[in-house]
Amino acid sequence: MKMRGTGTVLATAAGIVVLGLLAGRCAPSAPKGAKKGGAQSDIAAAAMKVYVAPGDLDEYYLFSSGGHSGQIFVYGVPSMRHIVTIPVFTPYPGTGYGFDDDSKKMLGEFTWGDAHHPALSETKGDYDGRWLFINDMNGRIARIDLRDFKTKEIVGPIPNVSGNHASSFVTPNTEYALMGSRFSIPIPKGTVAGIDKYATEYKGVVAGIKIDPQTGHMSLGWQILMPPFDYDLGDAGKLASDGWAFFTSYNTERATGKLEVTASQRDRDYIAAVDWRAAEKAIAEGKGDTIGGVKVLDPKKVPGVVYFMPCGKSPHGVDVAPDGKYIIGSGKLAGITTAFNWEKVQTAIRNKDFTGDEDGIPVLKYESIKDAEVPVGLGPLHTQFGPDGYAYTSLFVDSAIAKWKLGTWEVVDKVPMSYSIGHLCAAEGDTVSPDGKWLVGLNKLSHGRHLSVGPSQPESSQLVDISEEKMKLVLDAFTEPEPHYAQMVKADKLHPIEVYPKEENKHPLAVWDVKDAGLTRTGSKVLVKMVEVRSTITPTDFEVKEGDDVTLAITNIEQTTDMLHGLGLLDYNINVVVDPGETKTVTFKAKKKGVYPYYCTNFCSALHQEMQGYMIVR
Ligand code: RUQ
Ligand code: CUA
């Protein structure tokens, strides 16, 4: 772990502290699960591995999806300490997100989002520390800038993609973020067809959102019309399979009603293999039909753009090995996971080794493209990778992680998870060069492995040491709803700023001197330029008329780390937080007559309580 400042604490010293703590806790009542002798020293060894002494820093950032909280939670690994919450699809009063004009506009009509899969930007298949993308089920993708850990852009709802779950997986040079319809619907949106027409009139779409390599700006890339299946997860090919994207699909029965029964009839569903370079080219050539205002490629008219790889029924995750040579996917009720050989897939495509087609999309022959069925255990969902050819597969039904070897297909170890693991996340485990070291199991249940908090229980994320042959569970952490996927990146790849440099602030309403602060009126429009600096909000009072449209433009002129100021305006539901060097605006109607105090919400100095003022509405 990294040590900061002068307090260089030797690992052994930290260990002694931990041992001391453990010994202390053994009397009078031993901590749950602590045993004498060997087990005790196991706990001490585990504690030493994860202990990050006061003032020291973690080695990795873990960006964990907040699910339907619409946020991202940032943890340090190995401590698993929650460091910060990045609001993305949901207002977050803690940082004033969703209250100021810009973030409010970005959220649009939505006050929630269901975020599942964070994706760090990549260069040559490695995390480059620039951006973080995350999907929302409501057809959106967001981009967070890792320079300041702020959500900068939300695109969507994207036309035609309904229930964007198979997202936001990015390609190896961040050319595209993937999207897919979990719920096929009649398209364009707004078209109505009875559920009895599901098999013929409902459609799925898989898509790529184009990402500008310089700015990260997102725009529509390509869309492909797909049969009415449920497109569940995705991953981008890399190295050997670069240029391709993979999506799992279930309900290839095209069934309706009780899907747990009706969509489990066939033995196999599919992984769709999309040649995204071909899709990109076809769109550039103007191919495609306009649906919902967007060009959509029909595979019948653009052959070669997509193929189906049969896999175990009702698959969930699909994961591409670091060298891109194997594609891992399985039925989620099966006891095996299949390793597809990319070279065999290409050969099968070349030889037209098909068993048929689905709405014009060729179906490859399972036997021709698989290399192995690995007996990982029951309920395989997702796979991550280590640096040494090892793969780690989460087993929902067995509630465990299986470690196995690519190439020999041997299952070498298993570790139980508490409880019901979904995704898992290895250090840089989705890149061309995974780190090994740490693996986090993102579990769906915690079943009271924590102090009781009533019926609304958190989820659990468990840290597993994978630095040795045997996996070792070393820490329980509790996470808010709902950790789906997470990504873990080496901390030194990120270079966040700590203040917004004054010279970079180009906001047209910024004021840097208290004498420039104050009110200007244009008809019924009132602009109040405000300055925040310890320990005054300037102006300390202002007057407007009932019915005025008021814009407050607030600049925090501090250039000191951590010197945030806020502005809470009572009775008006206004709450803005301004970081050092930042300018934010908030616009509202002065619809209530009276005297309304405003104040700084972030405790900033000894005279923080004095940092207040009055808005008078006549
Ligand atoms: S999911 S537990 Cu939303 Cu990624 Cu797999
Ligand atoms: Cu500024 Cu408190």
Image (tube, helix red, strand yellow):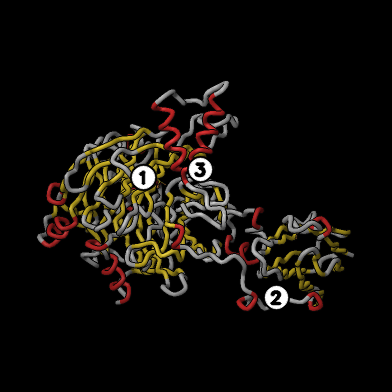
Q: Residues within 10 Å of mark 2 (few under 14, many from 20)?
A: many
Q: Amino acid at mark 1?
A: Asp
Which circle, 1 or 3, is nearer the viewer? 3
Element assignment for label 2: loop
Could you tell me if the residues under marks 2 and 3 are in contact, i.e. CB atoms within 8 Å? no
Real-space Cα separation, disc 2 to disc 3, in angstroms: 47 Å
Inspect this view and state whether residue 524 appears.
yes
Q: Which residue is mark 3?
A: 14
Query: Is 263 positioned to the left or the right of 36 in the image?
Result: left
Above or below residue 15? Residue 577 is: below
Which circle, 1 or 2, is nearer the viewer? 2
Q: Earlier in the sequence, mark 2 or mark 3?
A: 3
| Residue 565, position as x, y percentages in the image | 72, 61
Q: Amino acid at mark 3?
A: Ala
| Residue 520, position as x, y percentages in the image | 81, 77
Q: Residue at x 24, y 67 (%)?
A: 302
Q: Residue at x 47, y 43 (%)?
A: 12
Inspect this view and state whether residue 72 appears.
no
Q: Which residue is mark 1?
A: 196
Element assignment for label 3: helix
Nearest the camera: 158 or 149?
A: 149
Q: Residue at x 70, y 75 (%)?
A: 510
Q: Amino acid at mark 2?
A: Ala
Query: Is 57 positioned to the left or the right of 292 in the image?
Result: right
**Where's ligand 1: which quadrant?**
top left
Q: Which residue is mark 2?
A: 510
Nearest the camera: 322 or 527?
A: 322
